[in-house]
Amino acid sequence: MLRPALVLAPLLATSAAMAQPIGFDQALEARELSMGGAYRALGTTAVGVDGNPAALALFKFFQLDAGGAYDFGNHEWYVASYVRDSKSSPLAAGYSFHYLSQPLTTVTPTGTTTRYISGYQQVFAFGVPVADYMSIGVSSHWITESDLRINAASLDVGVAFKIGTVATLGFAGHNLINTNHPVQLGRYFDLSTGLRFGPVRLAIDALANFGPHEFHPKLLFGTEVALGNSLFIRAGADWYTRTQYVRSTVYLTVGVGIVVDKGGFDVGYQQSCTGVGNLFVATLRVVL
């Protein structure tokens, strides 16, 4: 099942949602979803546009990705595309576009109703190295959802470090501008790391906000094992603590990737351990 993002807080306060809404920040590519959503410090794929913008400048790539996902249990789906260029100049830049749709079922005093809600998000991200081992970045997330009358943008800032060829480390603040949309653009911070030991890559992300009644940590874990130069096996898990909008949730993820010259194809699967949800994701990548 996908994560919260498209339902207004007043709506949730007056009626009980029977499905967890889609979250733009978790509408990921197959590789990142297969690794439990832990990717923010890796700096190796275009989906980093949505995470810590500073990580875009850690490595030199031009990438163009497109993909989509469908949840057969909840009939939720999204499509997403990304472009990232950290190769043409010292200033790394990226852009992503997401379109998401889901049925939302609510319980009212007069009965149960179901309707489809949808929306899109655009992200513009920039990162620049300030030393061989350090980069900084900034990005803007703009969400539009006409059915719920949402048209808002906020700001992310981050810093990332590269420790030789073994590790990366990042810290970022997300949605630092208050838009009065705590579900769609709620403020949070992340501390993330990526480790590489030969053919094995590990990623760990810890996300949380701070303040009265706002500390709801999320822990994300992922691993990727290279079998030669063309085949990658991935697995992960993520744990979301209970908030006033959604219940505590645990997900397990698996996936596989195939790499060819200047591109690749990834598929991933996410299973909820605490409710209904079986999400399939596929991504096509071009790397130059």
Image (cartoon, rainbow, N blue to C red):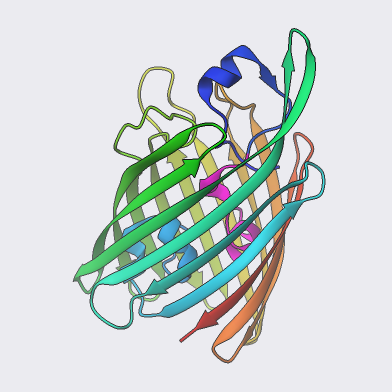
Q: Is residue 26 magenta?
A: yes
Residue 214's x, y, as percent?
A: 43, 24
Quadrant assignment for the N terminus:
top right
Q: Residue furthest bottom?
A: 261
The image shows residue 199 at horizontal and vertical percentages of 57, 77
| Residue 79 higher or lower than 145, as above or below | below
Residue at the (64%, 29%) spot, across then down: 248
Answer left or right for 122 relative to 10.
left
Q: Please, is residue 230 above or below residue 99 in the view? A: below
Q: Please count the marks in the image.
A: 0
Pick whichever, 207 or 288, lies toward us: 288
Query: Where's residue 159, x and y in %?
Result: 27, 56
In the picture provided, is 226 more to the left or to the right than 75? left
Answer with left or right where residue 160 lies relative to residue 48. Answer: left
Residue 174 seen anywhere in this rendered image of the structure: no
What residue is at 69 percent from the left and 41 percent from the top? 102
Residue 123 or residue 237, whichever sits in front:
123
Find the magenta span and give its range. Answer: 22-38
Viewer-proximal residue among 152 and 271:
152
Q: Is residue 72 above or below residue 113?
A: below
In the rendered image, which quarter contains the C terminus?
bottom left
- Residue 93: image quadrant is bottom left
Residue 137 at x, y = what percent?
27, 59
Verify whether residue 27 appears in magenta.
yes
Q: Residue farthest to the left? A: 130
Q: To which quarter of the image does residue 34 belong?
A: bottom right
Please name the residue shown 66% across and 72% down the image.
266
- Can residue 186 be seen in this snapshot? yes
